[in-house]
């Protein structure tokens, strides 16, 4: 990660800029970067903006034909959720963490930081999940 990108993420973490502003700045940085030197691999895929979940099934779910669910979640929503955790009082975070743990979701929301979500989103770019069953197909991917 280059220094300018790191500075943008630091400003985001400190609350000096919004996630939208950070995204615009990072996009501008990517456009301004000079051509890759020989031997370097250029970035082929654009930065993902959505997490897509598609479920297709032969079951009609009570309707007239095959069932289909198509959900497109903006990754910006993840970023906003991380920023919102900073507004939750510490006592409430402790209670939320305890309930999540009881439900089998061992996540410590006090450790969730904006720079972590950016790293997660970078890794999501490479994630594609396909589940095929005789009567259903589930796909999860970034676009």
Image (tube, grey):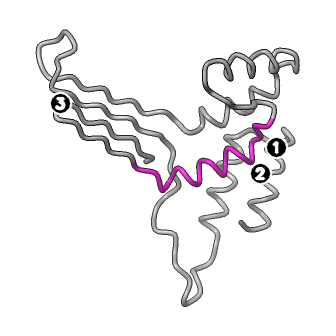
Q: Are marks 3 and 2 in contact (CB under 8 Å)?
A: no
Could you say whether the residue bearing mark 2 is in a helix, strand or loop?
helix
- Extreme residue in the top direction: 62
Q: Residue at x 86, y 18 (%)?
A: 89
Q: Residue at x 62, y 78 (%)?
A: 34
* Dot 3 or dot 2, earlier in sequence: 2
User: Which region of the structure is painted magenta?
Assistant: 111-128
* Dot 1 or dot 3, earlier in sequence: 1
Residue 28 drawn at (x, y percent)? 64, 59
Circle 3 sits on which residue?
Answer: 135
Circle 2 sits on which residue?
Answer: 9
Mark 1 against mark 3, which lies toward the viewer? 3
Residue 110 drawn at (x, y percent)? 81, 31
| Quadrant that contains the N terminus | bottom right
Up the image or down, 21 lies above or below 30; here it is above
Q: Is residue 87 magenta?
A: no
Looking at the rendered structure, the number of numbered marks drawn on it comes to 3
Could you say whether the residue bearing mark 3 is in a helix, strand or loop?
loop
Up the image or down, 55 lies above or below 113; here it is above
- Mark 1: few/some/many CA within 10 Å (<14, 14-19, 20+): some
- Mark 2: few/some/many CA within 10 Å (<14, 14-19, 20+): many
Left of 7 or right of it: where is 69?
left
Q: Which mark is residue 13?
A: 1
66 or 22, nearer to the observer: 66
Q: CA distance from mark 1 to mark 2?
A: 6 Å
Residue 81 drawn at (x, y percent)? 67, 29
Left of 125 or right of it: where is 11?
right
Up the image or down, 42 lies above or below 115; here it is below
Residue 97 drawn at (x, y percent)? 74, 22
Up the image or down, 75 lies above or below 60; here it is below
**Rendering quarter of residue 58:** top left
Q: Residue at x 65, y 48 (%)?
A: 23
């Amino acid at each position: 990660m280059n220094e300018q990108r790191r500075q943008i993420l630091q400003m985001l973490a400190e609350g000096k800029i919004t996630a939208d502003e950070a995204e615009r700045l990072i996009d501008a940085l990517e456009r301004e970067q000079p051509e890759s030197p020989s031997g370097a691999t250029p970035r082929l895929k654009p930065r993902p903006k959505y997490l897509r979940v598609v479920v297709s099934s032969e079951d009609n779910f009570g309707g007239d034909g095959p069932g289909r669910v198509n959900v497109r979640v903006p990754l910006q929503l993840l970023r906003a959720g991380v920023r919102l955790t900073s507004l939750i009082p510490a006592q409430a975070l402790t209670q939320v963490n305890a309930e999540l743990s009881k439900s089998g979701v061992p996540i410590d929301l006090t450790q969730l930081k904006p720079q972590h979500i950016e790293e997660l989103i970078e890794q999501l770019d490479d994630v594609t999940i396909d589940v095929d069953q005789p009567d259903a197909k589930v796909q999860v991917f970034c676009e």
